[in-house]
Every structure is written in C-alpha cells, then in structure tokens.
Amino acid sequence: MLQLSWYHVLGWGKGALPWVMALHWNYSVTQILQIQVSGSSASMACQVSAKTIVHWYKQHPGEPPKRILYVSGQSPVFDDSSDTWRFQVRQHPTESLYALTIDYLTPRDSGTYYCAYWFYQGITVFGSGTKLIVSGKLHSRPANFEILQKEHKNQIMYVCLIEKFYPDVIRVTWTDKGNKIVEGDNIVKGDAWKPTKEDKYSISSWLTVPAEKKDENYYCNYEHETGKESVTKQGI
C-alpha cells in the first residue's frame, strides 16, 4: 500500500533536492500551518512511496475539498484555468516527491491544501494537510492567559482562558505536576470564539477533577505561532 507524507518546504538545494521539515504521515491528525504575507510565496510538498498521479485539493472552512489540479507527467492539469500562472508543481527527478508553489499570494489563497492519490475502487487517500493563512496582519500573542476555578460539591472545575490572539490556530493542553498530558472525558476543549473588531481571537478549555485533588497542581499550556506558555493554579 502506498503511504503519503507531508512536508513543509524550506527551499530547494542542489539537484532540486528540497530542504524540508515537519514530516506528517497520512494517518496523522497533526496539521502543518503556514502564515504568509500578501505578495509572498508558499510551498507545500508531499511524497508518495511510488510513482503515481498526485492530486492537489483546496478546502475552505465548512466546505468540501475542491480539486485544483493533478500531476500526471511533467505538466500539471488544472481544473480551473484562472490564475494558473501563479501555480507551479515541481517533481523530484529521482524520487516520488512533489512540491506545489503558489506565487503572489492573496488572502483568497487562504485555506487548507491537501495532496492525495486515488487508490483503488474509488478510494482517495489524503495527507494531513497544510493550513495556509495569507494576511498582511502581524501575529499577536495572547493578551490574557489565566486559569479560573470553581468548587461545586465534590468537584473542582478549572477554566483556562486565553484571550485576544492572532491568528486563530492554537493548541491547548492540560498537564499534571509530572508534565504528563491529562486526557479524558473530564476535559472540554472549546473552539475559538468569533473574532473581535480588531480580528483577535479567544478560546477556553475546561478541566474537571475530584475535590480531593484540589491541592494538586494542574497546568494549562498553549502553543501558538507567537510562542508557547504555561500557567498553573494550585488549590483553592
């Protein structure tokens, strides 16, 4: 069976060999994020374990993926003839590595891009995707990051509040004093709230623990384009 991988292309070295980072297999839930300024370029690459026809899809939030092109040979075949001059597909001369480059980016290029191949009997295998955000706005780290808490009967609820950041892609986790990630039904991860007029986002996450654990430390952590941070609240 073929396996599909995603890479973030940093550049092309001698012999058209790309410098790459952030490998993700097709069954990974981790998604690559690229944030670019209008007028710049973005490169996304995928690798398959054998020569095959590679398809590239673009997806907008709330919509199904839409194919933009496929590669069968040297030249890409586009589903839409508009703006094709801004799209380039390069194939490694000896390896099954393909790179899609979009030049002169505009905000309408924002979306999630997937490469895929058609397996058999109508089965399509997708990579984990690259979310591309095109904007002239500067990144903004959270303006407020804190844990609120409330005790109710035999439980304690911790609410991790992260406010006013940009862009909206952020990863929030809870860890214990041993730096072990806390997982389970006692955690509720909310979606980012609707942006403010300044286009800033906020998000919250809830952790519920038994009251007898009120003296234990729990940490809320976030990873964002602007960096990572952790905060804790001990006891009540």
Image: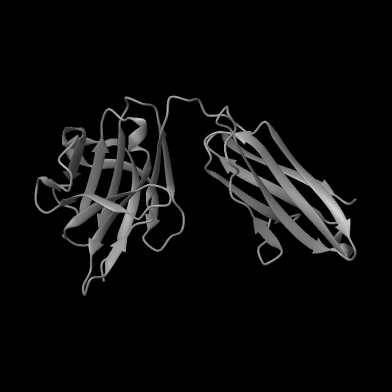
The quarter holding residue 103 reads top left
Relative placement, left or right, of 20 versus 235 is left
If the image is split into quadrants, where does the N terminus sit? Answer: bottom left
Image coords of residue 151 (percent x, y): 88, 56
Vertical arrangement, residue 174 with respect to residue 35, above or below: below
Image coords of residue 145 (percent x, y): 71, 38
**Residue 215 is at least partly visible in this image:** no
How did the renderer colour the structure? one colour
Image coords of residue 212 (percent x, y): 89, 64
Residue 50 or 173: which is nearer the viewer? 173
Relative placement, left or right, of 79 versus 165 is left
**Residue 157 is at least partly visible in this image:** yes
Residue 184 or 59: which is nearer the viewer? 59
- Circle count: 0
Q: Residue at x 50, y 25 (%)?
A: 138
Q: Residue at x 10, y 45 (%)?
A: 75
The quarter holding residue 199 reads top right
Image coords of residue 6 (percent x, y): 34, 52
Vertical arrangement, residue 120 with respect to residue 164, above or below: below
Q: Residue at x 82, y 50 (%)?
A: 149
Q: Residue at x 16, y 58 (%)?
A: 53
Relative placement, left or right, of 80 versus 36 is left
Residue with the most extreme bottom position: 121
The quarter holding residue 216 reads bottom right
